[in-house]
Structures are given as C-alpha cells and as structure tokens.
Amino acid sequence: MTAEQIRQFYDASSALWEETWGEHMHHGYYGPTGQYRVERRQAQIDLIEALLAWADIAAPTSILDAGCGIGGSSLYLAEKYSASVTGITLSPVQAVRAQQRAMTTGLGDRVSFQVADALATPFPTANFDLVWSLESGEHMPDKAAFLQECYRVLKPGGQLLLATWCHRPTASLAGPLTAAEQRHLQAIYEVYYLPYVISLPEYEAIASDSGFVQLRADDWSTAVAPFWDEVIRSALDPRTWPGILQAGPDTLRGAIALWLMRQGYASGLVRFGLLTARKPGE
Ligand SMILES: C[S@@+](CC[C@H](N)C(=O)[O-])C[C@H]1O[C@@H](n2cnc3c(N)ncnc32)[C@H](O)[C@@H]1O
C-alpha cells in the first residue's frame, strides 16, 4: 500500500463522503456501551468531544491534525480552543477543500492545510501543544516512524491523542491471529488502503519506546461499532448509488466492504484503540 494509492483513494472518494456524510471522516460515538441513539453527524461530533474529555485535553494553542481529511476536526478544535491548527493529508483534493472550508468558516487566519507525509513532516521540532490523529494511524506504513515524528514535533509537555483502527491483542488467551482472521484483515486493508493494523498494546509499546510518558490507552470498539450500521444504511439508500458509481471502482469496493467492518467488530477482531501520552516536559 503506497502513499500514492492512499492519495488516489482520498482524492477520488472525499467529495462523495462530504456530500453524503459531511466533513467528519471518522466513526461516531454511541455511548460507552454503544446504546445511545444519536443522529449520525452528531455522533461524530460526540466522538471528538468524548475523546477530548477522555484525554483531558487542556486548552492547546497550537495543534497538528495528522491525517486531517477535509478538516472536520481541525476546524472544530480551532474554534473550540481558539487555537492555531495545521492539518496535513496525503490528498491534494482534501487539502484544497479543507482550506476552502477554513475560509468560509472565517478561520482561515489560524487554520491551514497542506499536503505532507505524517512520517516526515516539514515542521520544526517542538512546535505543537497537541498532535491529534483521528483515524489516520491505520494508514501509516511505519507506526514507529509515525509516533517518533509526533514526538519530535510536540513541545516538551505536549500531548498526543491517537484514535485508530487496531486488531485484537494477541498476547491474550486468544493468542495469535488465525489464518481466517488474517484473511479478513487483508480484505479490509485492500479496500481501505491500509498497509496493516496493529494491536493497542503494540501502539503502547511503540509510544513508550519513542520516549512518550504518562501513557493511557483504552478500547472503544463497543462505543463506535454501531457506526457501521449507519454507514451501511446510507450505502443502501439508492440516492447514494449514482455518487458511488461516479467516484469509481475503489469507492464501490469500499462500499461493499462495509460488511467486513461490521463483522470484524462483531467477532472482536477489529478494535478501535485510543492512546494518549505526553512528551516529557523540560
Ligand atoms: C479516514 S481519514 C480521517 C480524516 C480526519 N482525521 C477525520 O477524522 O475527518 C484518513 C486521513 O489520513 C490521511 N493520511 C493517511 N496517511 C497519511 C500520511 N502518511 N501522512 C499524512 N496523512 C495521511 C489521509 O490523507 C486522510 O486525510
């Protein structure tokens, strides 16, 4: 899975996603047990708020949104905290659209977007109070390089908040992934352009090895899994079909694969992992 393929995927599919779903390209939050019945866009905003509360984020003034999509989180965080936000994405289409949205929402003076690789960003060391990565870690071909880069660009005392697709832990009684589980994941990787995912304990180990301290992790699979029922419902609506076909074969395959995600959560294979940690202060 190359950066070029990920770029093409988001270049082709982002307009359709925005038209159907709006500016947030991530799961919704349906309460700790997944029981809340919430309108789908509200559920996505609820996820952002629940993550901020969980990580106890304290008024950052400079934020990097690593893997920003069309700037849903970036603009939300900029407004909430009166912060400066820089969003990076591999997709030029997303960067342009996000910048347009920043201008129309009146936040263009302190929110900016650019095409950059989160594994090797163009930013100085110790530049941000918060690195926010909402559902981009699963795309990273080198998870250690990604977390090391997050660490580098954070100011001393700065905080990382990562929410990402994982697979189940393998050091537990359930043991290593079975061949069937690996095939299931492989099918998900192919449609969503993911090089691979890892377990949450593996992320914790990498963060710790990268120098992060005050690590906390949690598994919110139950809270977010109902999202896929919503996406499936919207994909089954004939009004979205022309858009799916127009966006091309990759988007069509992505729509078909929605069931793989629902089943992955149901079996416990696919997990939604949260990690927050700090760069040590001076
Ligand atoms: C599922 S979208 C999430 C977008 C956004 N965080 C949101 O929640 O609305 C994944 C994003 O990660 C970005 N991405 C993937 N790999 C990346 C990389 N190596 N560097 C920068 N961005 C990357 C994609 O371009 C895309 O914008």
Image (cartoon, rainbow, N blue to C red):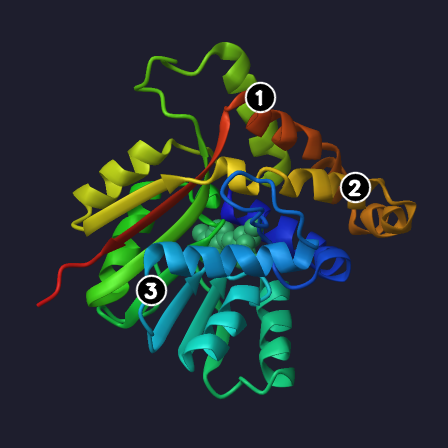
Say which mark, if any, is on residue 233. 2
The quarter holding residue 201 reads top left
Which amino acid is tagged 1?
His
Q: Are marks 2 and 3 in contact (CB under 8 Å)?
A: no
Q: Nearer the viewer, residue 85 or 218?
A: 218
In this view, the residue farthest toward the left is: 282
Above-or-below relation of 40 to 250 = below
Write down the residue under mark 3.
57
Q: Between disc 2 and disc 3, whose residue precedes?
A: 3
**Which residue appears at 25% of the width and 51% of the height?**
148
Q: Nearer the viewer, residue 143 or 131?
A: 131
Q: Between disc 1 and disc 2, whose residue precedes?
A: 1
Which amino acid is tagged 2?
Arg
Q: Secondary structure at mark 3?
A: loop
Query: Label 2 to label 3, Cα distance in Å?
Result: 34 Å
The number of numbered discs placed on residues in the rendered structure image is 3
Image location of residue 263, percent across then percent down: 63, 25
Residue 245 visible here: yes
Q: Are marks 1 and 3 in contact (CB under 8 Å)?
A: no
Badge 3 crowding class, 10 Å Cα cut-off, few under 14, some 14 to 19, many 20 or more, is some
Above-or-below relation of 174 to 53 = above
Q: Secondary structure at mark 1?
A: helix
Using residue 256 as the reference point, say whether residue 140 is left or right of it: left
Which amino acid is tagged 3?
Ile
Q: Secondary structure at mark 2?
A: helix
* Mark 1 lies within 8 Å of ligand 1 (Cβ measured): no
Using residue 51 as the reference point, say whether residue 239 is left or right of it: right
Q: Between disc 1 and disc 3, whose residue precedes?
A: 3
Image location of residue 206, percent across then percent down: 25, 40
Write down the residue under mark 1.
184
The quarter holding residue 188 reads top right
